[in-house]
Image: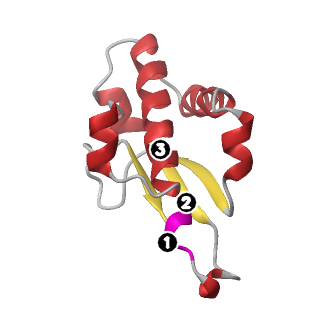
Amino acid sequence: MSPERFEELVGEALDEVPVELMSLMNNVVFLVEDLPPGGGDDLLGVYEGVALTERGWDYAGALPDRITIFRLPTLKVCDTEEDVVEEVAITVVHEIAHHFGIDDQRLHELGWG
């Protein structure tokens, strides 16, 4: 799958996030990269930043948080474009949840692990 098509799928997944939820997100950017730093191929996405639940009085002026979705690891675990669509949607929700302070354990309990 081309990088352009993969980026389209990430955009479509973001379009599916309820507007009310997106409006609560603050100071965060979404990126697509081929591979995680270090070239590992088992990480599908990552949230880098300070979760909303952890932000204090000293947060002002911080650089934007980053949610990055990794194309090649995602393609590695998927057999069809339909699988990619589903996996991208799950990964986007998973990383957005981290922005709201939800940890991996709770995400697994909720079925978004």
- Which numbered disc, 2 or 1, marks the residue that appears first in the sequence? 1
Judged left or right of residue 37, residue 34 is right
Residue 85 at x, y = what percent?
49, 20
Q: Which mark is residue 66?
A: 2
Give the residue pinned by disc 3.
69
Q: Secondary structure at mark 2?
A: strand
Residue 54 painted magenta? yes
Mark 2 surroundings: few (<14), some (14-19) or many (≥20) residues within 10 A: some
Question: Which residue is pictured at 37% across the width and 37% down the height?
Answer: 72
- Which numbered disc, 1 or 3, marks the residue that appears first in the sequence? 1
Amino acid type shown at disc 3: Ile
Asked whether the viewer can see residue 10, the reply is yes
What's the CA distance linking mark 1 and mark 3? Answer: 23 Å
Amino acid type shown at disc 1: Glu
Question: Which residue is pictured at 41% across the width and 52% down the height?
Answer: 102
Residue 1 at x, y = what percent?
47, 23
The magenta segment: 51-55
Judged left or right of residue 66, residue 73 is left
What's the CA distance linking mark 2 and mark 1? Answer: 15 Å
Q: Secondary structure at mark 1?
A: helix
